[in-house]
Image (spheres, rainbow, N blue to C red):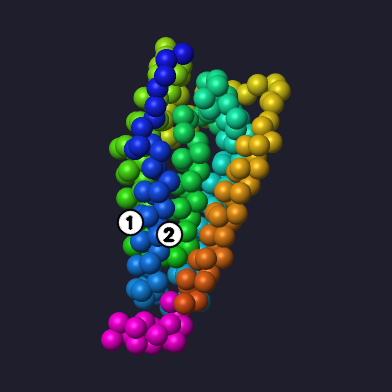
């Protein structure tokens, strides 16, 4: 197997995405809500965000069951990877979108869009070049058969048995400790944006 590298555009994807979301989150905290806390609009947005969050969380775990410990050793084409080529990225996008919707913040959604743009233009193509170098024609055939992001349900297939990497599940569990806090952080942000003392403090700091 030829030696290949995914390159820095792929390796720095988490840093770039984290910076985009951190900057967007900071903007959220210093901009007033479009509608008052407790309004029906906020309640509707928060309620609408939960299904996206749940779908993203479930998809991450499902994809980890299949890809954990196998990514560079074998070409995984079953389960969620028979629906689309990057279910983990799709899951992360759903989780990030859920936060923006719960917050009702166009600024945060813009940060999500910037992170997604980086992934789409740089990180994912770099990763796919890397996988082509690893798996050659088998990966080319996989790309022709399976869409990159949007699931194609008619192509679903799964093995009768599945060997699960407990190490990968532990790693995903540690990652989950970050994204499971998203609904809590949304509530904290909503509280701060509706608190008069928060805006008084910001005015004092910037005055």
As drawn, 158 above or below 42:
above
The numbered mark at residue 100 is 2
Q: Seen from this angle, which residue lies furthest left?
A: 207
As drawn, 59 above or below 54:
above
x and y, in percent, of residue 88 in the image: 51, 39
x and y, in percent, of residue 118 in the image: 32, 43
Task: Count how many numbered circles sit on residues in the image.
Answer: 2
As drawn, 125 above or below 25:
above
Q: Is residue 200 magenta?
A: yes
Note whether residue 66 is visible: yes
Q: Is residue 66 magenta?
A: no
Give the crowd class for mark 2: few <14, some 14-19, many >=20 residues within 10 Å: many
Magenta stretch, main secondary structure class: helix
Residue at left 34%, top 38%? 9
Q: Quadrant of residue 177?
A: bottom right
Q: Classify the position of the C terminus by image quarter.
A: bottom left
Give the crowd class for mark 1: few <14, some 14-19, many >=20 residues within 10 Å: some
x and y, in percent, of residue 181 in the image: 57, 60
Residue at left 38%, top 36%? 10
Residue at left 65%, top 42%? 170
Secondary structure beneath label 2: helix
Residues drawn in magenta = 193-207
Q: Quadrant of residue 156?
A: top right
Front-lying residue, 133 or 99: 133
The numbered mark at residue 26 is none
Q: Determine which residue is flagged by label 1.
A: 110
Residue at left 36%, top 24%? 129
Secondary structure beneath label 1: helix
- Work out whether mark 1 precedes mark 2 in sequence or the reverse, and give the earlier one: 2
The alpha-carbon separation of the residues under discs 1 and 2 comes to 9 Å
């Amino acid at each position: 197997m030829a030696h290949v590298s995914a390159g820095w555009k792929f390796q720095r994807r988490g840093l770039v995405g984290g910076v985009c979301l951190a900057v967007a989150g900071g903007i959220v905290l210093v901009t007033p809500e479009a509608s008052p806390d407790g309004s029906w609009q906020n309640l509707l947005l928060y309620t609408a965000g939960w299904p996206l969050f749940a779908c993203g969380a479930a998809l991450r775990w499902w994809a980890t069951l299949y890809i954990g410990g196998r990514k560079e050793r074998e070409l995984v084409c079953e389960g969620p990877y028979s629906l689309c080529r990057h279910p983990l990225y799709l899951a992360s996008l759903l989780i990030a979108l859920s936060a923006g919707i719960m917050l009702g913040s166009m600024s945060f959604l813009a940060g999500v869009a910037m992170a997604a743009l980086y992934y789409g233009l740089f990180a994912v193509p770099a990763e796919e070049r890397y996988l082509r170098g690893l798996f050659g024609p088998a990966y080319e055939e996989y790309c022709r058969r399976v869409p990159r992001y949007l699931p194609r349900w008619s192509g679903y297939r799964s093995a009768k048995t599945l060997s699960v990497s407990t190490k990968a599940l532990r790693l995903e569990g540690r990652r989950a400790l970050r994204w499971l806090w998203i609904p809590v952080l949304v509530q904290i942000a909503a509280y701060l944006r509706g608190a008069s003392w928060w805006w008084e403090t910001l005015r004092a700091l910037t005055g």
